[in-house]
Amino acid sequence: MKTSTGKRPTRLPTSFKGLTAVMVPHAITDDVDYYNVVELMNRLAMVAHPTGEQEHYLKTLEAVVESHDREHADPLLDAAGSTPIARLRYLVESSGTTVTGLGRIIGSVPAASLILNGKRELSKEHIRKLAAHFKVRADYFL
């Protein structure tokens, strides 16, 4: 996370109050601010066993980003659709990726098929791999 001191905690706090000490949820004001909020969201999304308060804080940040995104429409989101699966389908179709290719990206062809058919949710690990492969932010799939 870009901060004025250049420091960031190596471990995220487990309480909502502790997380607000890292960043108070607020309206996004510019691209750097957006990047910082999204980076913190990505870090929270990668927590293996989040506390209830961490999940609540992540949902709060998601609401802030969604509000900002509605006001500053992203053409990629507009073209892709509103759900994570619709966005994935858009990326898969527009890149010419097959179900087998998607399976190679996420590590399982059967899982890829289930995800594309809406019968399975994207996991945090899937999101990490997909974001890296398609060169999009992880929050694109949230």
Image (cartoon, grey):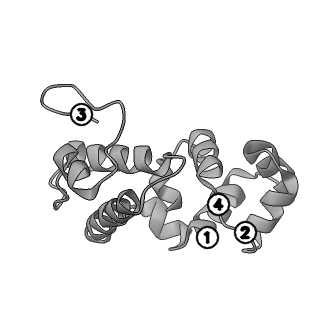
Q: Amino acid at mark 1?
A: Ala
Q: Nearer the viewer, mark 1 or mark 4?
A: 4
**Above-or-below relation of 46 to 117:** above
Does label 1 or label 4 sit earlier along the sequence?
1
Can you tell which mark lies on residue 2? 3
Residue at figure coordinates x 67%, y 64% from the top left: 89
Q: Amino acid at mark 4?
A: Leu
Q: Residues within 10 Å of mark 1 (few under 14, many from 20)?
A: some
> Which is nearer the eye, 54 or 128?
54
Say whether residue 104 is left or right of residue 124. right
- The Cα–Cα distance between marks 2 and 1, rounded to whole angstroms, is 13 Å
**Above-or-below relation of 83 to 102:** below
**Is label 3 in a helix, a strand or a loop?**
loop
**Is label 1 in a helix, a strand or a loop?**
helix
Q: Nearer the viewer, mark 1 or mark 3?
A: 3
Residue situated furthest top in the rendering: 6
Say whether residue 31 is left or right of residue 126. left
Can you tell which mark lies on residue 109? none
Q: Give the labeled residue for mark 1.
A: 86
Say whether residue 22 is left or right of residue 43. left
Does label 4 or label 3 sit earlier along the sequence?
3
Q: Give the labeled residue for mark 2.
A: 120
**Is label 2 in a helix, a strand or a loop?**
loop
Q: Quadrant of residue 36?
A: top left
- The Cα–Cα distance between marks 1 and 4, rounded to whole angstroms, is 12 Å
Does label 1 or label 3 sit earlier along the sequence?
3
Q: Amino acid at mark 2?
A: Arg
